[in-house]
Amino acid sequence: SELSIGTFTFSRGMLIHDLRSKRLQICGMSSDVKAAIVFNAGLAFHLLANSKNESSLLLKACKMYRLSQSILRESVTKRGSVSKLCFVHFFHVVLLNNLGQIHCDLVDYEASGYYFEHLETNLKHLVVKGKTLKD
């Protein structure tokens, strides 16, 4: 049988509690908080694009999702800045899924395939990780 592609968009916003000391919070937002804010902006564009059927909003959502990824990647390379969100596979699953859906909607199947392949890798990792936690 032929595989069919369904559509599913993770549509819940993200809330991050900044548990750093008050002194560090005054210095600025953590990279996790910044990434969550940018993700939520992307999600707002994504949901609005779906309801209004506007591809220009999908492109904005895509940019926000990618920026969220970039913020986390950069935080890992900076000294003294520790991102916990960067190492949470579920966050990457959400981003990869939504980016894949956007590119599918934009009829960019090559990019969509790229994101869905990475999504599959992350899901497999979560399954293996879940099995090892049960053992």
Image: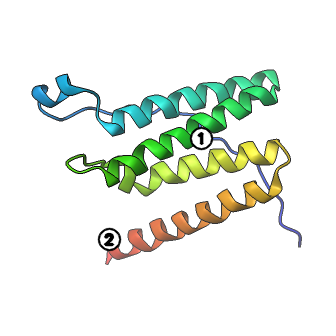
Compared with 33, 112 (above or below) is below
**Quick one: label 2, few (<14), some, or many (20+) residues within 10 Å?**
few
Q: Which residue is mark 2?
A: 133
Q: Is residue 45 left or right of residue 134?
A: right
Q: Which residue is found at the position 49% from the left and 40% from the top?
A: 68
Which amino acid lies under the numbered mark 2 shown in the image of this protein? Leu
Query: On the rendered image, what quadrant is the N terminus found in?
Result: bottom right
Residue 80 at x, y = what percent?
19, 48
Residue extending farthest bottom: 135
Q: Which residue is mark 1?
A: 10
Q: Which residue is found at the position 33% from the left and 54% from the top?
A: 77
Compared with 114, 100 (above or below) is above
SS at badge 1: loop
Residue 126 at x, y = what percent?
46, 65
Residue nearest the viewer, comparing 121 with 1: 121
Label 2 or label 1, whichever comes before in sequence order: 1
**Quick one: label 1, few (<14), some, or many (20+) residues within 10 Å?**
some
- Real-space Cα separation, disc 2 to disc 1, in angstroms: 25 Å
Q: Is residue 16 left or right of residue 57?
A: left
Q: Which mark is residue 92?
A: none
Q: Nearer the viewer, mark 2 or mark 1?
A: 1
Residue nearest the viewer, comparing 48 with 127: 48
Residue nearest the viewer, comparing 73 with 40: 73
Which amino acid lies under the numbered mark 1 shown in the image of this protein? Phe
Compared with 89, 16 (above or below) is above
Q: Quarter-wise, where is residue 54 in the image? A: top right
Q: Which residue is found at the position 65% from the left and 41% from the top?
A: 9
Residue 52 at x, y = what percent?
79, 21
Q: Which residue is found at the position 32% from the left and 71% from the top?
A: 133
Query: On the rendered image, what quadrant is the C terminus found in?
Result: bottom left
